[in-house]
Amino acid sequence: MRHLWSFLAGLVVAPVTWVLVTLGQDGSGRTVDRWVEIGTSNSANLIEPAAYLAVGGVLLGLLGTLRTSPLGPLVAGLLLAAPYVGMFVSPFQVRDRIPDGWKVFGDPLPLHVPVANGTLFLIGLLLVVATFSGQRWRRWPRPVAEPTPTPAEGPDRNEFTLTDWPPAGAADRDTTPPSLGYPDPTPTEPLPRRTGGESPWSAPPRGATRSEEDTTEIR
């Protein structure tokens, strides 16, 4: 589709450029000749022909540099160079086939001027040569969208809720803290009781009193 639009653009730009170059060249030539005749100049008289040439240059620049398709510059270049090439074969027939006597905004439109001085041939060759760039036949690369990172499978550690506690299987696991390398403490064995009598530290039975010897011995 882009080649079709480029082809149509070439068909339109070629005749429009021919008309703009003709108006610019004829207006500039008549203005300069008039300055020579009267011996003075006025730069404002060149604004109109310069505007025609500027618009024609912008159209040719867009057609020759845009990388939409090289088919448009190729078609426009061949159409613009064809009249001058025909001058080598049959100059009088080519000259007679060029319309004459047209006017644009009251200004004469001598279309044979850019053909006779070779301007159209020069522009046509520039457009034809511009199509021999290999990059012009390739489509502009399209940016590739970066894939959106997907979250890893499983629960997110940052999204902790009370419903996640205790974790599954926690009741089946041993919650005893691991040993730090120290030997396990052993229960202290009770002191052996004294044989052959009652321990001096044992309390006397209720209602009994200690003898004087026992009290002295404790002291």
Image (tube, grey):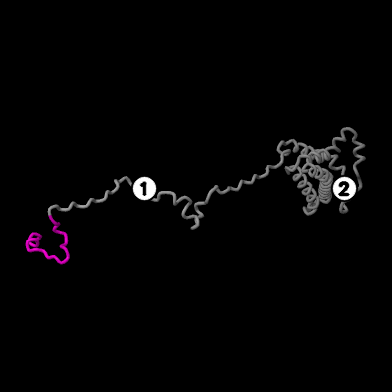
Percent of width and height locating residue 33: 83, 47
CB within 8 Å, label 1 to label 2: no
- The residue to which callout 1 is attached is 178
List the single residue furthest toward the bottom.
207
Quarter of the image with the C terminus in it: bottom left
**Left or right for 180, reference 14:** left
Q: Which of 154 and 131 lies nearest the eye of the viewer?
A: 154
Q: Earlier in the sequence, mark 1 or mark 2?
A: 2
Quarter of the image with the N terminus in it: top right
Query: Separation of disc 1 and disc 2 at Cα?
Result: 104 Å
Residue at image point 90% right, 42% down: 98
Percent of width and height locating residue 175: 40, 51
- Which residues fall within the magenta stretch? 197-219
Query: Is residue 117 at least partly visible in the picture?
Result: no
Q: Which of 171 and 122 lies nearest the eye of the viewer?
A: 171
- The residue to which callout 2 is attached is 109
**Left or right for 17, reference 160:** right
- Kind of residue at disc 2: Leu
Residue at image point 14% right, 52% down: 195
Residue at image point 33% right, 47% down: 180
- Mark 1 or mark 2, which is nearer to you? 1
Task: Classify mark 1: residues with Cα within 10 Å, few (<14), some (14-19) or many (20+).
Answer: few
Residue at image point 53% right, 49% down: 154
- Kind of residue at disc 1: Pro
From what the image shows, is residue 79 above or below residue 44?
A: above
Snapshot quadrant of residue 115: top right
Disc 1 is placed on an element classified as loop
